[in-house]
Image (cartoon, helix red, strand yellow):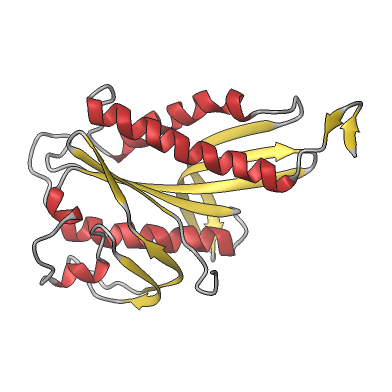
Amino acid sequence: MSLSGNTPLIEAEDFAERMRAAISLSWGMFSHKVGTGLLRINKEASMQLQYAYVLQQLIPLITFHEKESFEIELETGRKINNRTREIDLLFSGHFDGRKHQIAVEMKCYRTLASSGGKRGATDIFMKDVYFDLFLLEQYVASGVASSGVSLVMNDLERLVNPKKKGAKCWRYDISQGAQFGAERFDTPIGGESVKFTLANRYVFNWLKHGKFWFLEAEGCPPNAA
């Protein structure tokens, strides 16, 4: 079966797989460039822009048909449960009437803020990493995205390899090998109430490049093998 002439039919699964692979490959390239100092990232905004640029360069390599088209949107607003949310990056693909979208949320923690002062607030960062996972699940559940991926970077060793986990912020454990999911989270952080539930399972595996740690996380349904 073909679309025209001898052009093979490109299955929807393959189309989605190429897009997902591009997300991971771009993250790997971005991570190495940041680790060697080729890319300088001092806050989440620069992280988004530089990652989107790397991803954009890969689009011609994953395009296998002239009718395929891809689009990258940054900080794009979508209605989720009657509330407007801004998705950090939305990667959309179109082919032969099919549409596939991958939502990406990003978090960046630098010990020194872009202003040059010490940042602090690691507890809020940890909670926000978890809340991003919740948002990604909401994007998928509402049909805004087909799948969701969290990309996180930081330069603080104790967040990845802590010597102890006594503080309440470790309810939002982001350390190497952390496993969690299908849980309710309501431990308040920074004096603000927190209340959300994750439906999927997660495992955190960090990779280090230079002085930075990088994480790519995607939820797995609790009943998946």
Name which residue lies at 32% across and 57% down: 129
Residue 151 at x, y percent in the picture: 37, 46
User: Among all residues in the image, which is located at the extreme front?
Assistant: 225
Residue 116 can be seen in this image = yes
At 37% from the left and 61% from the top, the residue drawn is: 203
Residue 75 rendering spot, x and y as whole percentages: 45, 42
From the viewer's perspective, tell me whether residue 100 is left or right of residue 87: right
Q: Give the quadrant of the N terminus.
A: top right
Q: Residue at x 23, y 71 (%)?
A: 171
Q: Position of residue 28 (x, y in %)?
A: 39, 36
Residue 121 visible: no
Q: Quadrant of residue 79?
A: bottom right
Q: Quadrant of the C terminus?
A: bottom right
Image: 182 above or below 214:
below
**Picture coordinates of residue 104 (x, y %)?**
46, 47
Does 133 sit above or below residue 29? below
Position of 4 relative to 80 (above/below): above
Q: Residue at x 52, y 68 (%)?
A: 221
Number of marks present in the image shown:
0
Closer to the camera in the image, 9 or 92: 9
